[in-house]
Amino acid sequence: MAVSRYACSNGDVRCREKLRVEPARLRGQELWLDGYNVLTVLESALADGLVLLGRDGCCRDIAGIHRRYRKVNETIPALRLVGEAASALGVSVCRWWLDKPVSNSGRLKTLILETAGNAGWNMEVELTFSPDHVLSHTDQIIATSDGIVLDRCQRWVNLARLIIAERIPQARLLDLSPAGN
């Protein structure tokens, strides 16, 4: 599992790097999140789980979502980290895209909106059958570490890595990236 999360070609690394935008470019922009992808990586980091730093510089967990999502103790703290980061970066709206077929997506949508409302963050949540398709075809800046989406998107920001580096320094990060990445 770790190797499959880490692996990508040198060409993929170069292409992904060309499409990556610096977080400062988010000011005044919408940010579209691969909801489960970003959330589960941050939950893993907060839970002292292993987080892999891949060849492309993206943080990935080894858990994965399979038809069911379950709220954990780290869910709300992870949502707050995303909201605080988006706010600090000056994002105009943070739009979460969640997989409609995944059980409890509706509950997670409610939790995201409640957390955002309580903090005054401008967040929206969309349930769709294929967030990967939506994120692969938008011209908005996206946040994901899903290699398939990264290979097809127009622009992306490495949000999970930024949050982990700045706010979860104790995370168990296994660096699989080449030296100097």
Image (cartoon, helix red, strand yellow):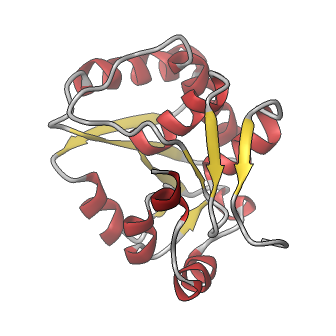
Q: Which residue is located at x 38 percent, y 36 percent?
A: 124
In this picture, residue 35 sits left or right of residue 52? left
Percent across and percent down for residue 155 are 51, 72
User: Which residue is painted at 33% across and 36% down in the image?
Assistant: 65
Q: Quadrant of residue 57?
A: bottom right
**Residue at the extreme bottom:** 11
Q: Judge from the rendering whether residue 84 lies leftward or rightward of residue 12; answer left or right.
A: right
Q: Is residue 143 visible?
A: no
Quadrant housing residue 83: top right
Q: In the image, what residue occupies the spot 79% across and 44% down?
A: 165
Placement of 1 over or under 101, stated as above or below: below
Quadrant, the C terminus: bottom right
Give me the residue at 40% from left, 16% from top: 71
Residue 73 visible within the image: yes
Question: Where in the figure is residue 108, as x and y percent of width and height?
Answer: 34, 22
Residue 96 x, y percent position in the rendering: 40, 41
Query: Is residue 44 shown left or right of residue 90?
Result: left
Q: Nearer the viewer, residue 158 or 178?
A: 178
